[in-house]
Amino acid sequence: MIASPALPGRHRMRGATLIDVLVGSVIGILAIVLATRALVATLAMQRSAAASAEAEQAALLSTFAIGEVVAGAGAGIAAAAAWLDSCPATADIATSLRPVSVLIAGSGRAELADSLTVKRTLQARMAAPAAVAAASAAGAPFSVRSPDGFAAGDRIVAIGRDGTCAAGTVTSVGAQAGGIAALGYSPATFAMPPTGLVLDLGPAAAASTLRLDVAAGSLRSTDVSNADAPNPLVANVVNVKFQYGIDRNGDGTLDEWVAAQAASGMDAASVLAAPAAALARIVAIRVGVLTRSEAVDPQATSAFHWTLFDCAPAPPAACPGRIDGTIAAAPGGNYRHATREAVFPLYNTLWNRPN
């Protein structure tokens, strides 16, 4: 038998060796490790970005909520300031009948939140106090020149203009001839002089005096006029600081920012007792908020240094209202934080300033 000759160009087939398999496995494992590390890093960046966005969103919502309240500060109160100026001072903004549109209660420490209380009328039918038509004895209805402005259930302030004032609630509105209404009120203990006035603050159930503060990590509002329970507005709020914007010379231009403290003469007790002319010099409120993310970010391993009310590029010594603080990071990570500032003019005060 004759063997057939080998065909040209044909080679004997060979399989993969153990070394080939090991080299391929190592390359595959390295690729998986690198891809996993890239995925983990990407997810960590996404978590950090989301945490930063949460903190920024909380700061934005906080300033918006505060601005909405401050916008109504002094509504009706500023217009009646000249008459409310005769009311006696008290140590509690909830019971004060003086023309205090805003009151900052300073904490005295940079790391502790301040609170802000706003007073306003919620009466849409009357822009100024109603004059009385005749004097009335204690217990007798008020006789006022405003047949359509008052309604049963309204909270009112009786202004004697002789150093006496009283708060009460309208119980009845009886029409009389000549555009005069007889207001029944409770508690009926005020003797109205013939030069008196009656200011309507709106429905007694509404929050004519509203306080904003921070507790348990939330910005909250409290209707102190009705002693209601606090209402949480924004979560993850660490700190809120307020300052008064003062027009020192009465030219209608803001001159300086002042903290609510005894050293500046703008502590709560001084503001509550201040005359109407001094209260009219408070033309704006400056707000600074410090917020955090909902969850801890393990990538945030360094302390967070925050500053409010800076005036860069001037040196810190040139910023008397500047506030600095530091939040230490925990070993397992820290919250992401954000700061935001805003300035809110007191429009009702500006529009009703005495000439």
Image (tube, helix red, strand yellow):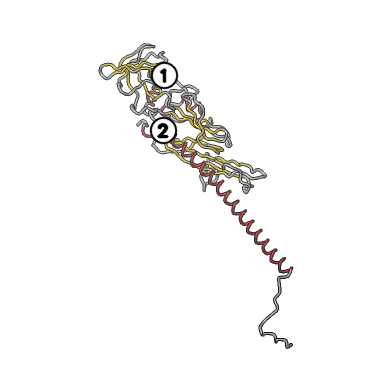
Marks 1 and 2, how far apart at CA: 22 Å
Which residue lies most toward the left here? Answer: 178
Find the residue positioned furthest to the bottom.
2
Relative to 91, does residue 345 appear above or below in the rendering? below
Say what amino acid the circle numbered 2 marks.
Answer: Gly
Residue 189 pos. (x, y %): 41, 13
Neighbour class for label 1 at 10 Å: few (<14), some, many (≥20)? many
Can residue 10 be seen in this snapshot? Answer: yes
Q: Percent x, y for residue 196?
A: 35, 18
Label 1 amino acid? Gly
The residue tagged 2 is 72
Q: Quadrant of the N terminus?
A: bottom right
Q: Which residue is mark 1?
A: 168
Left or right of 322 in this view: 128: left
Name the residue located 38 percent from the left edge and 13 percent from the top edge.
191
Placement of 274 over or under 132, stated as above or below: below
Residue 248 in view here: no
Q: Secondary structure at mark 1?
A: strand
